Amino acid sequence: MSRDDARTIRAGRRSVRIQRPGKVLFPGGGGAKEYTKGDLADYYRAVAPYLLPHLRGRPLMLERHPDGLDGPRFMQKNTPEHYPEWIARAEVGKEGGTVTHVVCNDTATLLYLADQACLTLHRWLSRTDRAGGPDHPDRLVLDLDPPGDDFAAVREAAGRLRELLDDVGLPAAPMTTGSRGVHLVVPLDGRHDVDTVREFARDLAETAAARHPDRLTTAARKQDRGDRLYLDVQRNAYAQTAVAPYTVRARPGAPVAVPLTWEQLEDPGVDARRWTIADAVDQARTDPWAELPARGRALGPARRRLADIRP
């Protein structure tokens, strides 16, 4: 098969055509392995059973690289008119109007997006198919962003945040971002609006930073952070997104954002780019978030506990 040929992949009742599967999206070199569009499609097909539960009902922002990592990047919110009618969509409000996002509910959609050279799926923290809709998130995300590539600092900060979350009665699960840091994902019951969730996330981060002012910071400006790890809560605002579990990142070697157990996070051999499309499916099969409660927690009790312990 030449690089210009097409492949057809069966996904349930649909067949999805992958154009130019041999097109290189992740160039090799410098120790990084080369991966093609066909490799991307194969990965997303294999990981679909584990990825789709984190995508269903959620508007997506698509990070596309039609010419691979060496070409331009497109951050796509609106769904183009030429996308097939069987791909789900969600129209949500924005200032001065609305925007219609892609919603990925099945493997065929996932493959179609791979054909569009969509490397990374950035998801909303709310669902449009649940009570409350996009204004009521059922996920809270704390983004642990180190000043450099020091993953030991990320590991330490995650442990400190876990202690604080335990204090307020909220479970959390770690996930490598596939870039530099870790996301701590907290499942919620979706009863509180986005402003309440964002305020709570901010108060949580400020409490953690106050407990460990030499290690953690909530300073938005990089010049104010020094060598402290930044606790970023901005993803909890309306219409903001977070990298979906098991999505590929646009970096050499095709690293993947991978859910972890807390025990795995403590492993010195693990860092933010430990897994790639070559082995992320193996990690997914272990079900690292199996201990997370099936239903999200109510935020009210946690807010009251946090108010009691804030400095």
Image (spheres, helix red, strand yellow):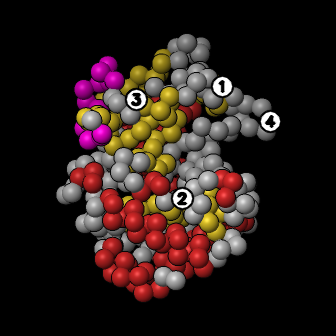
**Residue 19, percent from left and from top:** 48, 18
Return the residue at label 3.
112
Q: Which badge, 1 or 4, comes first in the chain's sequence?
A: 4
Residue 222's label in the rendered image is none
Left or right of 171, for residue 182: right
- Labelled pair 3, 1 in contact (Cβ < 8 Å): no
Of tags 3 and 1, the one toward the viewer is: 1
Return the residue at label 1.
70
Between the C-alphas of marks 2 and 3, the distance is 32 Å
Between the C-alphas of marks 1 and 2, the distance is 28 Å
Return the residue at label 2.
232
Amino acid beneath label 3: Tyr
Is residue 22 something that shows in the picture? no
Task: Count all numbered tags in the image, as a single digit.
Answer: 4
Which range is magenta? 80-95
Inspect the magenta stretch and tell me whether residue 262 lies in it.
no
Q: Which badge, 2 or 4, comes first in the chain's sequence?
A: 4
Secondary structure type for disc 2:
strand
Of tags 1 and 2, the one toward the viewer is: 2
Secondary structure type for disc 1:
loop
Q: In this view of the protein, which residue sits in the foreground, 171 or 258? A: 171
Residue that appears at 47% across and 32% down: 75
